[in-house]
Amino acid sequence: EKGGYEHFMLKEMYEQPKAIADTFSPRIKDGQIVIEELGMNDEEIRAVSKIVIVACGSAYHAGMTGKYVLEGMARIPVEVDLASEFRYRDPILAEGTLVIVVSQSGETADSLAALREAKKKGCKVLGIVNVVGSSIAREADNVLYTWAGPEIAVATTKAYSCQLTALYLLAMRFAYARGAISESELAEMIEDLKKLPAQVEMLLSHKDRIQKFANRYLAARSIFFIGRGIDYAISLEGSLKLKEVSYIHSEAYAAGELKHGTISLIEEGTLVTAVLTQEDLYKKMLSNMEEVKTRGAFVMAVTNEGNLDVEKAADYVVYIPETNRFFTNSLAIVPLQLFGYYVAVGRGCDVDKPRNLAKSVTVE
Ligand code: F6R
């Protein structure tokens, strides 16, 4: 069943290239992003004044990436909320707000309740869902399916990657319809999207090197992740992957917030993983890395190919290949998934079924 892999989590990480391609391929037609399931024409897309994304856990992290991408690319204001918070705070939803519920299982109780709340308030709800025919898929006004296939491991990998892909498609569709990107920018993005599967594959092929590195941290007490902007969103997901399967405490911090707290936790040898893929935030990240290094941290960096300066501020570097600045999360997550996975394997954890966790959280 595991097709020769030791765990479903590893198998599902390896299924990412195909899952990502299956999610975007049917929606690229004649150089355009065509999302019939959206049920919206250009005019309706232009009439959207705000987007609110609600979800839980990793799906919430995908939503955070979605916020940076939708705002940056399509210039639409986006709010992201945890479904368990959104549903209880009597959210203010003005006319023209599109609510997006992101869920792998389509059965998460809080996400389903948030969907109902949004509908009750008169909003149009779009589901980004993996399980066909699930409750969220049935109750949403429209569904954009992520074609990840069945996900067995409790810790999500391929479904999360497909959620990112679905959000990129949506952002591209919105950005083009609203005149925020040109025809040639769209064409370039489509080319970059098409390159993602092979790039993910290439990053997966470095698994032995990551495993060797992970083996040095099996007894770590705490591991930190830092990033800015879109790289903060991926830091949150990288940190969740590690802690949920390895039971090592971990925290992700917006790098600019370090000196407001977490930096006091850095000790000699503490591992800090820094993600820096955004050119405009690059220098700021380098100085945040220096800050922790001076305090004894060991710094692992995930950055773009060619950013050789990083080697001065980091002790260990993973390079990701070139892509559109909005798509870097899809590549940066791969070494972080592998790292969390191998730390858990090295510690002898039940990787596919971490204690106390369930694949589908149907309690509130
Ligand atoms: C983490 C993980 C969870 C889920 C969350 C939402 O690896 O899998 O955090 O992302 O429970 O689940 P869905 O997407 O099914 O609504």
Image (cartoon, helix red, strand yellow):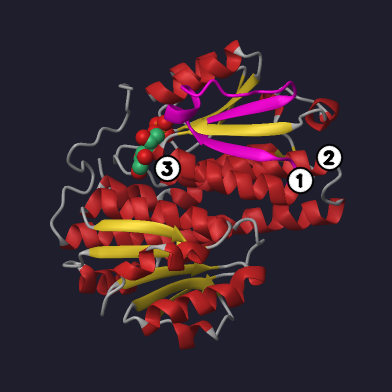
Percent x, y for residue 253?
43, 59
Q: Is the CB atom of the residue marked by disc 3 within 8 angstroms of ligand 1's nearest atom? A: yes
Total marks shown come to 3
Q: Secondary structure at mark 1?
A: loop
Residue labelled with disc 2: 178
- Callout 2 touching callout 3 (CB < 8 Å): no
Query: What's the residue at 55%, 62% (across, down)?
Result: 228
Ligand 1 position by quadrant: top left
Stretch of the chain drawn in magenta: 74-101
Magenta-span inclusion, residue 84: yes
Residue labelled with disc 1: 75
Q: Secondary structure at mark 2?
A: loop
Magenta-span inclusion, residue 163: no
Quadrant assignment, res 57: top left
* Mark 3 closeness class: few <14, some 14–19, many ≥20 residues within 10 Å: many
Residue labelled with disc 3: 58
